[in-house]
Amino acid sequence: LTSLLSASDLDRRTAVELLDLAEEMATVAGREVKKLPALRGRTVVNLFFEDSTRTRISFEAAAKRLSADVINFAAKGSSVSKGESLQDTAQTLAAMGVDGVVVRHPGSGAPHRLAQAGWLEAPIINAGDGTHEHPTQALLDAFTLRRVLHGEPASGAAGTGADGKDLAGATVMIVGDVLHSRVARSNVRTLHTLGASVVLVAPATLLPWGVESWPCQVRYDLDEAIAEFAPDAVMMLRIQLERMHQAFFPNAREYTRLWGLSAARLHALPADAWVMHPGPMNRGVEISAAAADSPRALVLDQVANGVAVRMATLYHLLTGEDSH
Ligand code: CP
């Protein structure tokens, strides 16, 4: 792996190796050793053309825990606002010397353009591009699921009980605004690669054309789907109001009534089913407080695991190693 642009870049073996490496990173981070010298002398640039809380901060934390130098670039306040292009921005960074580039961009395909154009020689990690992909989110979700489904603590230092394992036999339901969700696209691919069965549940107006060809099943009624599939986990997606270019059906109130994870639907799930959300959450819209704050919610574990998964990704891409 030379860059991580898409969940399709990961076959089962590489994905499991990255998850195992993230376990090593989580174990180190959870003990007295808070920092590893693995990337000392390297520089990682966080190139963010779109807002982020979790992804940007966890990439920064991950790079720093590996002793890399970190440069945070936000398009807001940069010369991008004066019209500087992606090419000139990338070449400016290359001229200063960077060893890894983490890029978030509102344009689907921007990280691929960076990688293919050759403006930068450094590995590129897609930290979310438009409605396209968010592969490290899918990896951290898989890491969290692998932990809990193999009886390990959801986050923090764990044993090695999940090492080498995948998600075969698990059923994961992804619910909501699939149309605009890069998280859904990367998760469908990664979960399928790791052997899980994936069910998308959404209003027809929030599903993309071509979804029939994705490696998953599709349902429109959440109550029926919960009864039919008895999922091991439900992943609720954020309604992306900022990407709705016109009034959408259903409106927010209808959406919450029909597709929101209410307290009643939480109760209808199998008693051991896990609740996931990539964040940021619209509380009271796609997820109730009862679900978000329940003991079955993995939302903060997903955030915590993001650091270990991004440490593993940076380490693997910048050193070519798959074990510390
Ligand atoms: N899950 C996620 O990508 O969150 P941020 O937009 O805050 O990075």
Image (cartoon, rainbow, N blue to C red):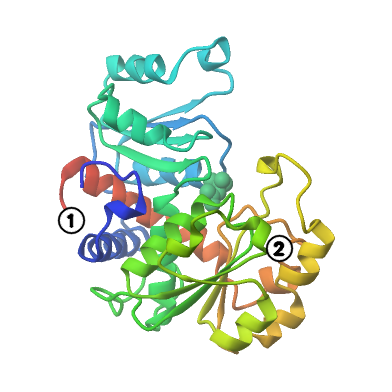
* Residue at image location 30% in from the left, 58% down from the top: 25
Q: Distance between the residues labelled 2 and 1?
A: 37 Å
Q: What element carries label 1?
A: loop
Taking depth in this image into account, of 314 and 9 the one nearest to the observer is 9
Q: Is residue 105 above or below residue 257?
A: above
- Give neighbour class at mark 1: few <14, some 14-19, many 20+ (Cα, 10 Å): some
Q: Is residue 53 above or below residue 249?
A: above
* Residue at image location 27% in from the left, 61% down from the top: 15
* Residue at image location 65% in from the left, 42% down from the top: 243
Report if the CB atoms under discs 2 and 1 are less than 8 Å apart: no
User: Residue 321, position in %: x, y?
Assistant: 15, 51
Q: Which mark is residue 322?
A: 1
Instruction: Name which residue type carries label 1.
Output: Asp
State the quadrant of the C terminus.
bottom left
Q: Earlier in the sequence, mark 2 or mark 1?
A: 2
Q: Quadrant location of residue 300?
A: bottom right
Q: Residue furthest right?
A: 253
Taking depth in this image into account, of 307 and 242 the one nearest to the observer is 242
User: Residue 270, position in %: x, y?
Assistant: 59, 89
Ligand 1 has an atom within 8 Å of the beta carbon of the residue at disc 2:
no
**Between tags 2 and 1, which lies in front?**
2
Q: Is mark 2 on a helix, strand or loop?
A: loop
Residue 156 falls left or right of residue 76: left
Residue 210 falls left or right of residue 271: left
User: Residue 274, position in %: x, y?
Assistant: 55, 77
* Residue at image location 75% in from the left, 78% down from the top: 263
Q: Is residue 247 in view?
A: yes
For label 2, the residue is 286
Q: Is residue 212 above or below residue 166?
A: above
Q: Which mark is residue 180?
A: none
Instruction: Name which residue type carries label 2.
Output: Glu
User: Residue 63, position in %: x, y?
Assistant: 35, 41
